[in-house]
Image (spheres, rainbow, N blue to C red):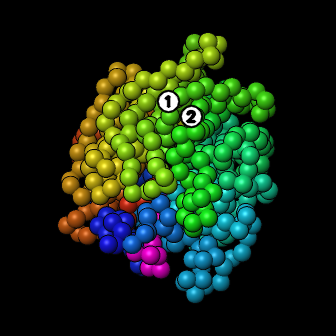
Amino acid sequence: MASRFLAGLFAPVTEEVTAFDLPVTGRIPPELNGRYLRNGPNAMGLEDPDSYHWFLGKGMVHGIRLRDGRAEWYRNRWIRSESVANTLGEKWSGGPVFADMDWAPNNNVIEHAGRTITLAEGGARPYEMSYDLGTLGPCDFGGLPGGYTAHPKRDPRTGELHAVSYFHGWNHVQHIVLDRGGHIARTVNVPVSDGPMMHDFALTERYVVIYDLSITFSADLAVNGARLPYAWNDAHPSRIGLLPRDGGADEVRWFDVEPCWVFHTLNAYDDAAGRVVVEVARYPWMLDQGRLDEIPPTVLDRWTIDPAAGTLRQDVIDDRSQEYPRVDERVVSLPHRYSYTVVGEDIFGAKVGEVMLKRDARTETTETRLFPRGSGVGEAVFVPTRADSAEDDGYLMTIVFDPERGAADLLLLSARDFTGPPVAAVHLPAKVPLGFHGSWIPDPEDHR
């Protein structure tokens, strides 16, 4: 039986497309000058159709450039790792891979220090792309000791980019800080046992929050050829580490938490009482015996860690199964008011993306936006109207599938009028398979 990840909303596209002057319904705000980029897996036709899994597809970036109220172009491009370049009959760019782990990153795409960077994890290096999504090659930021992470966090005050990287061959994980210029400013190796997987972490003004949870490297799976050799490990307790932002590994404090798994952080911050507040989409388990075909529902959790008392308290904020949490990037590591998540009956299945939630942490209320069945709506990226605008004074960008056209739209929603009509819909010329994460990257002055 062919994998469900090769059909329906997951089905890969087979061609790279370039289109200009895209049709738009509504009005694109003229202040939006830049690119919306979204990364995700896209099989190339060589995979085993019975065992293929969404997590393991080759990375493809989809991009839409907006300028002066127009949708100037759409492009989709595979990231040319060596294997992808060879499959396409092209010459690989070459570059600094780590531990022979050359991988077309399929998880995220960001900008830092003027560079467009695509991200994976587990020891794989990022790949850099050009403005128009050509592949420039692997990126080690001038000296990464290993790989990088799928989910770096930018400090909105300093412009530094923080990461926590892992690799199964290490007896530690690594906190990495890139300065505003994209240079490695600091690395700290934090000892851990069993080779835990760390897809995400959290950042506050005082701490790097490390998730040492109950999924670890499995040598048995690796020997048997598993492409993702990690599995749930009852013998590896879940714990949360607080690494002082300027501290060493010997200053990390660990706090036990109920066994769980976290793909994604909503946000974290230090509260007025000196506690660390972390909000996450929490799974009760994941990768049982390494299996990727069973994924339990999530809850939205709040962990309140009191370093003075040595305690961690867990509270469920919302028991609806939700994923892809986002906040305004300007409040990452700071107290937030608004957040956005996507709800689905099976968050990694065909019913992904029929509901989006906007939560107001101050009033403890939630607004619900419904989408047509089969929309496959992705995560919401918040874009402020101005650099100094209020936290929800802006737009939410997300890609949805239009069943009538058989192609995708980039929707622009008003964050304040969350349930109202879209501000604009940019009609793309192709389908965009369900994917993972993306960014709004404002144009530098010389591109406007």
**Vertical order, 223 against 299 (above or below):** below
Specify which label sits upstream in the sequence, 2 or 1: 2
User: Quadrant of the rendered structure where residue 246 is?
Assistant: top right
Q: In which quarter of the image is the C terminus?
A: bottom right
Q: Which residue is drawn at 21% across and 55% down?
A: 373
Q: Mark 1 points at which residue?
A: 258
Q: Residue at x 43, y 69 (%)?
A: 51
- Disc 1 marks a residue whose amino acid type is Glu
Horizontal side of 29 relative to 386 (left or right) equals: left
Farthest bottom residue in view = 89
User: What secondary structure characterizes most of the magenta part?
Assistant: loop
- Disc 2 marks a residue whose amino acid type is Ser
Q: Give the Cα distance between marks 2 and 1.
A: 6 Å
Q: What's the mark number on residue 400?
A: none
Residue 290: x, y in percent?
A: 49, 54
Q: Do the residues labelled 2 and 1 touch (CB within 8 Å)?
A: yes
Q: What's the mark number on residue 238?
A: 2
Residue 305: x, y in percent?
A: 57, 21
Say which element carries label 2.
loop
**Vertical order, 258 against 124 (above or below):** above
Range covered by the magenta-colored residues: 39-49
Q: Residue at x 70, y 62 (%)?
A: 139
Residue 32: x, y in percent?
A: 45, 52
Q: How crowded is mark 1: few (under 14 residues within 10 Å), some or many (20 or more)?
A: few
User: Quadrant of the rendered structure where residue 103 is?
Assistant: bottom right
User: Quadrant of the rendered structure where residue 244 is?
Assistant: top right
Q: Residue at x 49, y 41 (%)?
A: 262
Please indicate, yes or no, whether residue 350 appears anywhere in the rendered image: yes
Residue 258: x, y in percent?
A: 50, 29
Say which element carries label 1.
loop
Horizontal side of 230 relative to 157 (left or right) equals: left
